[in-house]
Image (cartoon, rainbow, N blue to C red):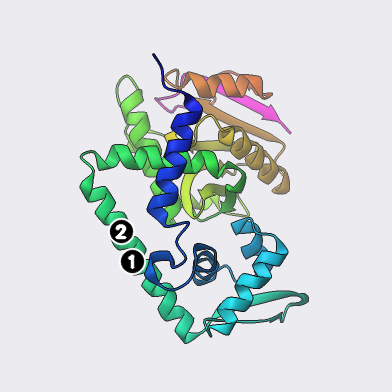
Amino acid sequence: MSLDPVARFRRFSRAVTSEVGALDTSFLGRGRPLGSARVLNAIGHGRTDIAEVRDYLGLDSGLMSRLLRGLEDEGLIETRPDPADGRRRIAALTQAGQREFEAYEDISNTRAKALLSRHPHPEALLAAMDLVASALGRDRIVFEEVDPRSEPARYCLGEYYAELARRFENGFEVSLSRDPDANDMIRPRGSFLVAFSDGLPIGCVGLKGGIDYAEAKRLWVAPSARGLGLAKRLMAATEDAARELGHTIIRLDTNRALPEAIAMYRKSGWTEIDRYNDDPYPDFFFEKRL
């Protein structure tokens, strides 16, 4: 006997709906429904452009207007024309709105910690949550070009190095590899892209500038986001960045312990070439002419 997948999905949906209080008229006991609280949360986290907030929350214009009007009537937000573009409107929290935003943050954080503390395997629970969040938010994943020394980049690179250490036959030591200098992955020489899912980093890739060719380096996708085509999108964005920077050739190297990466390169127009560096880790070398 196997349980019906649809029934399992719907049980999950009901559990989440109940846990987050989606049907409560007073979300987290603060006197307003979930929709109003989410708009307040989005503005509090820096999304001030009203059209951006509406798209982020997936709301239609009518509902968005009603929610904004309700928050204005409470004295929690102020809206005004964007000084840089009068056709657009922006929103900001008032002092009262900031206090309410912080109250929601405190309650939400406390509830999250309590739920995780009750579970015998919190890391497994978080891994499952990451998997679901990546699947549901796949259309809202965004790429940002960042400094490779920034916190999101360092997180991704740390996860990447740890995975190589687990998968390579003899482990992986960054100091032994041809680790690119950060300045080579910053414009105008190169670039470093991080994929974000609702603010959390879930993938990265670097473009190291060179004289005769550029190199794609440090492609990584979080396990929870694999199978969604994110690696292909990151590589395509890297090729676009290379073109913008005037590069006509990109190269990369990889190890036989990463067969999924090798297969992707072969299917997406990369040509296998002879070894072009003395890095001790790679077994395969590829090139693409742009």
The total number of labels drawn is 2
**Dot 1 surroundings within 10 Å: few (below 14), some, or many (20 or more)?**
few
In the image, 285 versus 85, the foreground residue is: 85
Measuring from the top left, give residue 221's x and y in whole percent: 48, 37
SS class of the residue under badge 1? helix
Res 31 → quadrant? bottom left
Q: Report whether residue 57 is seen.
A: yes
SS class of the residue under badge 2? helix
Measuring from the top left, give residue 251's x and y in whole percent: 60, 30
In the rendered view, would you say 81 is above or below 209? below
Q: Amino acid at mark 1?
A: Ile
Q: Quadrant of the N terminus?
A: top left
In the rendered view, would you say 183 is above or below 53? above
Q: Residue at x 52, y 37 (%)?
A: 217
Res 139 → quadrant? top right
- Circle number at residue 107: 1
Residue designated by label 2:
111
Magenta-colored span: 277-290
Q: Residue at x 38, y 69 (%)?
A: 29
Viewed as shown, does residue 183 lie left or right of 83?
A: left
Res 55 → quadrant? bottom right
- Circle number at residue 277: none
Q: Are marks 1 and 2 in contact (CB under 8 Å)?
A: yes
Viewed as shown, does residue 264 lie left or right of 19?
A: right
In the image, 83 versus 78, the foreground residue is: 78
**Dot 2 surroundings within 10 Å: few (below 14), some, or many (20 or more)?**
some
Kindly report the distance in space between the C-alpha atoms of the residues bearing marks 1 and 2.
6 Å
Measuring from the top left, give residue 135's x and y in whole percent: 52, 38
Q: Residue at x 37, y 73 (%)?
A: 103
Measuring from the top left, give residue 128's x and y in whole percent: 38, 37
